Image: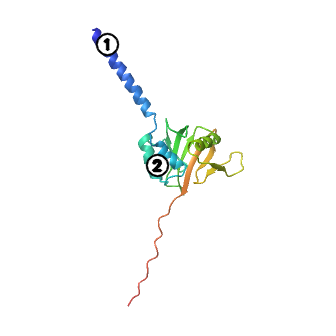
Amino acid sequence: MVVENVMRTCIAWIGAALALACGTAAAQAPTTFGTIIGNGLLCRDHTDNIYYYNYLLKHFGAAYKHEGGAFWFRTAGASLWGTTISEVMVSDDTSTYIFVGAVAEATPENLEKAIIQQVGTHYTVIDTSAYPVREAKPASRIVYFDTKSKIYCAKYKPLPPVQPPPVRQRLK
């Protein structure tokens, strides 16, 4: 009887430890998050919305909303440049741009400082509004998003190649 109680206690403890471990693992971003999403946000990579969509779907599950020409994914446990990233958005095919963006849990000033410190990419204020837009040379931008910031890389959607008109053949 004592052995059975010890066994039950051990099994319960192991089950609780596994549940805790699995819960923690689910809240972790993949190790490739900085390489894939981080470089995409800094416009250091080819911007391919289908690629980003599939990556986010695989690692974070289905988008929780689809609005404003984008699919929005919650990214629990993700961080870039020492800053928590709560959401990532990827353009759908209705926009004239292909983009990837993210909501950072920091002000634009603090996000910019973190990026400079970690990566060395500098941003320039490109307007004189109360909430100025910051832009880096590769076209990455940081904007205000309430008390947070949004960072994104947007590029014009490539158009399909134009086919030349058919050549008229001479009749003999």
Q: Residue at x 46, y 38 (%)?
A: 29
Q: Which mark is residue 37?
A: none
Instruction: Identify the secondary structure beneath mark 2.
Output: helix
Q: Position of residue 128 (x, y in %)?
A: 72, 50
Horizontal side of residue 43 vs 10, given as left or right: right
In the rendering, at what x and y percent does residue 141 appear?
60, 49
**At 31% across and 13% down in the image, what residue appears?**
6
> Is there CB contact under 8 Å for labels 1 and 2?
no
Look at the picture and state if 5 lies above or below 64. above
Q: Is residue 167 above or below residue 143?
A: below
Residue 115 placement, left or right of 2: right
Which scheme is used to colour this image of the protein?
rainbow
Q: Earlier in the sequence, mark 1 or mark 2?
A: 1
Disc 1 residue type? Val
How many numbered tags mark residues here? 2
For mark 1, give the secondary structure.
Answer: helix
Q: Which residue is mark 2?
A: 52
Please say if 27 is above or below 133: above
Q: Could you tell me which quadrant the C terminus lies in?
A: bottom left
Q: Which residue is mark 1?
A: 6
Left of 166 or right of it: where is 108? right
Three-letter amino acid code at the position of disc 2: Tyr
Q: Residues within 10 Å of mark 2 (few under 14, many from 20)?
A: many
Give the residue at x 30% y 15%.
7
Kindly identify the residue that appears in the image at 35 percent across and 19 percent down.
12
Q: Nearer the viewer, residue 96 or 136?
A: 136
Image spot of residue 154 (x, y percent): 55, 53
Asked whether the viewer can see residue 70, the reply is: no
Between 150 and 126, which is closer to the camera in this rendering? 126
